[in-house]
Image (cartoon, helix red, strand yellow):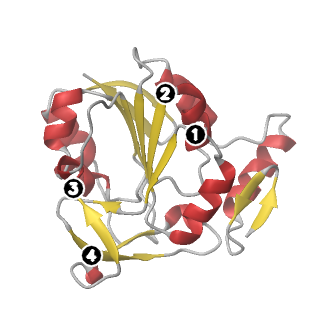
Amino acid sequence: MYQKHGFWFPDYDTHFAEMLDKNIAKGNQPVYQEPVRKKSFGFVANKGVALDIGANVGLWALDMCKTFRRVIAYEPVADFRECLQKNVPYFNLHIESCALGKESTMIDMIITEENTGHSHVNPDTKGSGQIPMHRLDDLEHDEIDYIKIDCEGYEHNILQGAERTIKQFRPIIVIEQKFHKDVGIVDEGQAYDLLVSWGARELARVRNDVILGF
């Protein structure tokens, strides 16, 4: 683990620190994907409970904790959680060590070194892995106002296990719609289409991220 610009990263990740360097070189603050956060937060009427699904080291969760009363971060990789805890030392952050999907099972993760943001579920380990996966619908929530999902092509799978929850709470949702060649599962718009079929509508796009609401 090493620290750069006030953030902690796994020793084998270089991508995020490079992105922060680029922002500083442009005369900006050392932040990551700030425009989509600012845009999406503006659509949330009640800043109550937010879910950060695929929290990684907490570059989103930090701002989420400053904005929402409570943030639940789902991050199945232990190295990332260790950085997350150091980067977001806020009392209103609750970290869950499980992955989310359309079924309750056990999985393993494929860690993409250099850019850990591309780390993703290994579908070949379903049922035989070491990391628990749960359906969001099977977890206890009494309020959800905002959901960010960035899980490298697994967004559709996660949403399939969250239909009841999303229809009940009708949160603002941010999903990444960028397809990477080194990720084993490719979401070719299925997550977006599923949300629209449930009544969501597109509110805005910021680069590769889509903001939807009900």
Q: Residue at x 51, y 75 (%)?
A: 111
Give the labeled residue for mark 3: 135
In what element is the residue under mark 1?
loop
Q: Position of residue 188 (x, y in %)?
A: 29, 54
In what element is the residue under mark 3?
loop
Measure how far apart labels 4 and 2 are at the Cα level.
31 Å
Q: Residue at x 32, y 31 (%)?
A: 144
Give the labeled residue for mark 2: 69
The mark nearer the N terminus, 1 or 4, is 1
Q: Position of residue 168 (x, y in %)?
A: 17, 30
State which quadrant residue 128 falls in: bottom left
Measure how far apart labels 1 and 2 are at the Cα level.
10 Å
Do the residues bearing badges 3 and 4 touch, measured as CB atoms within 8 Å? no
Give the labeled residue for mark 1: 91
**109 vs 75, nearest the viewer:** 75
Q: Amino acid at mark 1?
A: Phe
**Is disc 4 surrounded by few (<14), some (14 to 19) or many (20+) residues within 10 Å?**
some
Q: Nearer the viewer, mark 4 or mark 2?
A: 2
In the drawing, what numbered circle is on residue 106?
4
Q: Amino acid at mark 3?
A: Arg
Q: Residue at x 24, y 44 (%)?
A: 140
Q: Amino acid at mark 2?
A: Arg
19 lies left or right of 107: right
- Is residue 155 depicted above or below 173 in this figure? below
Quadrant of the image containing the N terminus: bottom right
The mark nearer the N terminus, 3 or 4, is 4
The mark nearer the N terminus, 4 or 2, is 2
**Is disc 2 surrounded by few (<14), some (14 to 19) or many (20+) residues within 10 Å?**
some
Q: Position of residue 49 (x, y in %)?
A: 40, 31
